[in-house]
Image (cartoon, rainbow, N blue to C red):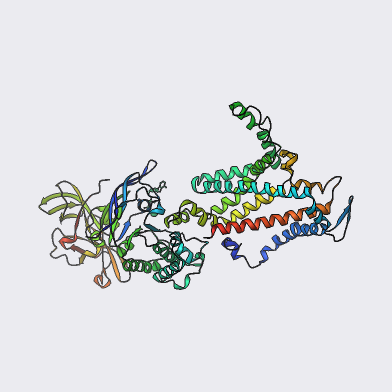
Amino acid sequence: MSSSAAPAAREQSRPHASMLPAAAFYIVFFALPTLCLFVLSFWTADGFQLIPGFTLGNYEKIFTSPLYRALMIRTIGVAFVTTAIVVPIAFAVSFLMRFVFERRGQFILQMVLLSLFSGYLVRIYAWRTILGKQGLLNSTLQWLGVIREPLDFLIYSNFAVVVTLSGLLLPLAVLPLYSAMLNIGRDDIEAARDLGAGRLHVLRTVLLPMAMPGVRTAFAFSFLLSAGDFVTPSLVGGAQSLLIGNIISDQFRGIGSNWPLGAAMAFVVIAVMLASYLIVMRLIRWVTTW
Amino acid sequence: MTQTAVEIEGVRKRFGAATALEKVDLNVGTGEFLSLLGSSGCGKSTLLRIISGFEQPTEGSVRIHGTDVTRQPPERRPTNMVFQRGALFPHMSVRENIAYSLKLKRWERSRINDRVDEMLALVRLEGFADREPGKLSGGQAQRVALARALAGEPRVLLLDEPLSALDLKLRQQMQLELRAIQKRLGATFIFVTHDQTEALVMSDRIAIMNNGRIVQHGTPRDIYRRPNSVFVSDFIGATNLLRGTITAVEGKRVVLRTDSGTFHALASDMAVKRGERAALSVRPEAISLRRDPGATPEGYSVAGLVDEIIYQGNTVRVGVRAASGAAIWIEGRGDDFDGLSSGTAVVLSWAPDAAILLREDTE
Ligand SMILES: Nc1ncnc2c1ncn2[C@@H]1O[C@H](COP(=O)(O)OP(=O)(O)O)[C@@H](O)[C@H]1O
Ligand SMILES: [Mg+2]
């Protein structure tokens, strides 16, 4: 993952004193908690009592339980579908903002930022009022006479989870992509066209590789955040659309909680996510080399 | 007569309400180095972009080697472009950049490699194949851009101020290099610049643009010697303009009365009438200076006082103020003006064919 790193990042490859605060922050707030969680995943629990030790029992439980496996597969499926919706749309939106709307693109960017500030829960509830049984979509379709009965797959379903997650994550994915697009000049695209590349080829050999840092971040945002989310499935998902995040969060609170098992689940999820991320990045690299 | 590479016919271009090009007609011969010269905003880039296919003309047509390409997208046209800031693909090496159009044409790998090496030799960057574009100097980057554009053997190469970001010395060197490459390949080049010296040095022919029109085209020598308008004579090189009214016409001989005196001139291929406003253009280096007020050739001289003397190294410019108050500049070798100082009374004169009569621009 080095070929298209930003030049600025390349220059700072040597460790530098000014990086120390960032490094300290990273260690205290990310590396240490993660390490604790990792150690915890090999312990066992008896009620609320944590028993230190080293057992692979938690991991074994995860891989042998049909419920956990099904949840894991569904989670990855939802994350993939969401990302497959979010990243291409965010890419197209960023492209339009950069090359079609130009200066008005900045205005759109501010709207995007504003929508992020409106809050996570508020936005999920907003989707509920759109997708609900008596929601905006159903009543509009009924009023238009397209349907007679409300469509019931719109809410409390995998569909609702994917749509809501996509709506939540789209603005977040636009930010890194738009900022990557700012490094691409109109003449870069024109040079490719001039040398004989059609539009699709320009996308594959110039736009995508040059926007790669943004694509990577947008992909990570939408893939990891949708795989880790448990609020959206519990608010708009049905009984059949719980995700692994819901089970993990259950392991950390209330009766029946089991921290070591939750920690192990979290690590399995992290490992699977990381592997998927690497595979997809490899795939994109393969598509953009010719 | 050489074959025509590019024929531009009645091309007009509007951007909304603004008109960028106003009925442009232009032919470019095969193997010709043509410069589009004009100040910023006069429509040079727009014309080049219409030839390359990045803009559609509002009216008119573009033909390349006889084929109408007006509606063809840029990727289908047999033209390639060198952009002002190079526009090298930053995620590809120099070699991959140059190979870009060849890969699109599905050339074989070994043939591509040979061609890239040939192009690198042409622009004298043999050791640079594996460099990243970000690690090239400005001049090297433009050479790679040239190599990339030439690799696919375009029938016409378009260059939009490719040297304007370079400093003077490098620019002058690259001008000669570019011209040499063009001659060696016998390729057709259309070169946009706002720098008149650059256009004079490099071109077979120059088309001078003003306000979206081509106001004159011809060889550098023709344009310098025989400008057809006050605008062109002022734009190309420095000149002295004596403006006034035509008081007599006898065949080709014309008498022009100005504030600085009455002058004679030849109306070479221009119909003029008594009473018309006109201007006389006399180049600074065509004027000679004498100190004794003896016999002055009537109609081809003016008296005045030395105002300013500017040393430019190998040449000296002298500003003379005529009795009317008009400033007239002359230029010559340093020792031509030894012993001159501010306030010296002098007589300026020129050969009859050095004064060019121009109609005043009607704007
Ligand atoms: N895409 C565009 N939209 C609107 N106006 C344009 C566009 N491109 C060029 N123009 C206008 O057309 C005129 C000619 O521009 P241009 O061809 O770039 O001039 P030059 O290259 O000679 O400096 C200018 O007034 C410029 O503002
Ligand atoms: Mg221009």
Residue A289 as seen in the image, left or right of residue B323: right
* Ligand 2 sits in quadrant: bottom left
Q: Vertically, is B41 above or below B112?
A: above
Q: Position of residue B240 (x, y in %)?
A: 25, 58
Q: Position of residue A222 (x, y in %)?
A: 65, 49
Residue B175 visible, this angle: yes
Residue B220 as seen in the image, left or right of residue A216: left
> Which image quarter holds the N terminus of chain A?
bottom right
Q: Quadrant of residue A231?
A: top right
Q: Position of residue A103 (x, y in %)?
A: 51, 46
Front in this rendered view, residue B42 or B275: B42
Residue B22 visible, this angle: no
Q: Position of residue A221 (x, y in %)?
A: 65, 51
Q: Residue furthest left?
A: B250
Q: Quadrant of residue A9?
A: bottom right
Front in this rendered view, residue A170 or A115: A170
> What's the residue at 61%, 48% (across, down)?
A84
> What's the residue at 16%, 46% (across, down)?
B275
Front in this rendered view, residue A26 or A81: A81
Q: How many marks?
A: 0
Q: Vertically, is A69 above or below A154?
A: below
